Image (cartoon, helix red, strand yellow):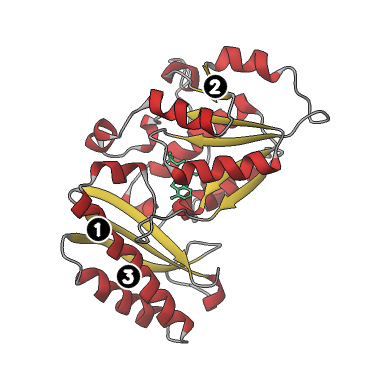
Amino acid sequence: MVKSINTRDYHDWRLQFTSENSSIGFVPTMGALHQGHLYLVQQAKRQCSQVVVSIFVNPRQFNDANDLESYPVQLEEDLALLSNEGIDIVLVPSIHEIYPVDDTSSLDMSSYAHIAQGLEGDHRPGHFQGVVDVVSRLLTIVKPQKLYLGKKDYQQLKVLEAMVRKEKFALDVIGVPTERAYSGLALSSRNALLSEDGRARASRIYEALQCAKAVALHGDSAEIACAKGKAVLQSAEGVKEEYFLIANRHTMSVNEVGSPKEWVVFCAAHVEGVRLIDNVEVFD
Ligand code: AMP
């Protein structure tokens, strides 16, 4: 039976495990779970003796108050889904367990700030600061040996890999491929805010990414690949482009993209007022 616990109960539960008798896999989420999250959970279950999932909607990573306000919350359904996956422990911390009133500190990101610039970093100021703050605090509580993150949030994965190295957390970061609907639309908690028609329109984002990828694989430049992909996106009714770019998979630089083997195509777009992001690696 799945149990949702707070930080203090988690500490008690965690005491029974050492690195000799266990491997703890950790899947941090903001809830409103879907098959993409469950795919991370399944991978963690295959590789770890215990899997801990956290559900915490992190206010620090929302740069838009309306976005935070409308973020879907469905704890009971989430717990039922995790129970079906055989998860026993779900950490559901309160806001003050993560951000005590007397601790307003933020992590120093200066040594990897370049990875957090551009793309989401430019379009959502303060977002990655909020992400590293919450994940570092969660890691200190959970003390996992493996951290599971989705490639759906590719830049987040790279920023968190850098944070884990810098802060010397002794754990492996596992990047998990993006789970998609049959139409190609990347699964996302935000898809729940779309109508059926909106979800159909949003699948053109993947089509545009795939077009850019095909052009890149054909041997064209990043500029040409981007232009062709953008054209697909711009022809999609009801889809408003925010950015469509190729960046280097290690540095996230859009100016020095390196060789095509290192290219990732990124897109942020709005459908029915919902902000969606997606990406594809040119060579996966
Ligand atoms: P979120 O609840 O949106 O913060 O996501 C929690 C984790 O699930 C993050 O590591 C995401 O990258 C990952 N994730 C979200 N959507 C997908 C997806 N469609 N496929 C794989 N991983 C995903």
The image shows residue 241, relative to residue 136, as above or below, that is: below
| Horizontal arrangement in the rendering, residue 221 relative to residue 49 (left or right) | left
Amino acid beneath label 1: Ala
Q: Residue tagged by mark 1?
A: 200
Residue nearer the viewer, 20 or 250: 20
Q: Which secondary structure lies at badge 3?
A: helix
Residue lying at the far front of the rendered structure: 84
The quarter in which the C terminus is drawn is: bottom right
Depth check, mark 2 against mark 3: the one in front is 2
One can see residue 227 in this view: yes
Q: Position of residue 45 (x, y in %)?
A: 64, 39
Residue sitting at x 22%, y 35%? 66
Q: Which mark is residue 238?
A: none
Q: Residue tagged by mark 2?
A: 2
Q: Earlier in the sequence, mark 3 or mark 1?
A: 1
Asked if the residue at tag 3 contacts the one at tag 2, i.e. Cβ–Cβ closer than 8 Å, the answer is no
Q: Which secondary structure lies at badge 1?
A: helix
- Neighbourhood count class around disc 1 (C-alpha, 10 Å): few under 14, some 14–19, many 20 upward: few
Q: Residue tagged by mark 3?
A: 208
Residue sitting at x 27%, y 49%? 275
Depth check, mark 3 against mark 1: the one in front is 1
Q: Position of residue 211 (x, y in %)?
A: 36, 76
Amino acid beneath label 2: Val
Amino acid beneath label 3: Ala
Residue sitting at x 49%, y 17%? 97
Q: Which secondary structure lies at badge 2?
A: loop
| Horizontal arrangement in the rendering, residue 272 relative to residue 243 (left or right) | left
